[in-house]
Amino acid sequence: MPWISKDSANTTIERRDEPYLTEAMIKTARETYLPRYETKQAATLPVLHMIQHTYGWIPHQAIEEVAEFLELTPGTVLDTASFYEEFWLKQKGKHTIAVCRSIACEVCDHAALTNRCREKLNIEIGETTDDGVFTLIELECLGACGGAPAALIDETLHETVTPEQLNALIDGARKNKAH
């Protein structure tokens, strides 16, 4: 779902009093990321990753804060964040189920995995369950063609997955309260 196109001029940005880009993050960016690059703009991806790893997604307020810190326009930072599939511009569930849709997984019926998730969780691709536990996505390639069809649950890769196995993995993730 790269490159989000919408009426951004009329978007209301939810704000909180404390910044998402904290002083500690700014210090890390100044000491670790900025020295690696010739321009501040080149540090956009690592700073966005830092935000996402901390909060699980990139709120629009954080986009503005990153833009100000890197001396860019918010539109430039939003363009960057919306281009890459790994960045989340809305909150996701505690657990993310990513079904690979590459050609190898397509040949091995990845659609059966996606459909099992849709049925079991009662959500569509890109949606989060009402209880906020699961988000379902499809990714272009998980790099596991030899183990197609593949699915990624949170950060764990599962290869040669059947719909029944995926069902059990979802049940296991639901029971896991640690995440």
Image (spheres, rainbow, N blue to C red):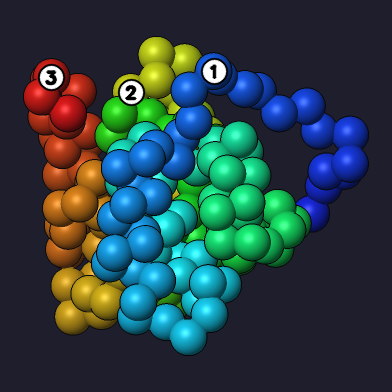
Q: Residue at x 62, y 51 (%)?
A: 68
Q: Residues within 10 Å of mark 3 (few under 14, many from 20)?
A: few
Taking the image as shown, residue 157 lies to the left or right of residue 96, namely left
Query: Which of 63/86 is in front?
Result: 63
For the residues bearing labels 3 and 1, Cβ distance under 8 angstroms: no
Residue 56 appears in the rendering: no
Q: Amino acid at mark 1?
A: Asp
- Mark 3 vs mark 2, CA separation in Å: 10 Å
Q: Residues within 10 Å of mark 2 (few under 14, many from 20)?
A: some
Numbered mark located on residue 133 in the image: 2
- Mark 2 vs mark 1, CA separation in Å: 27 Å
Query: Mark 3 or 2 closer to N-term?
Result: 2
Q: Residue at x 56, y 72 (%)?
A: 41
Numbered mark located on residue 177 in the image: 3
Query: Which of 112/7 is in front?
Result: 7
Q: Nearer the viewer, mark 3 or mark 1?
A: 1
Residue annotated with mark 1: 17
Q: Amino acid at mark 2?
A: Val
Q: Residue at x 45, y 55 (%)?
A: 48
Q: Secondary structure at mark 1?
A: loop
- Mark 3 vs mark 1, CA separation in Å: 29 Å
Picture coordinates of residue 87 (x, y %)? 47, 54
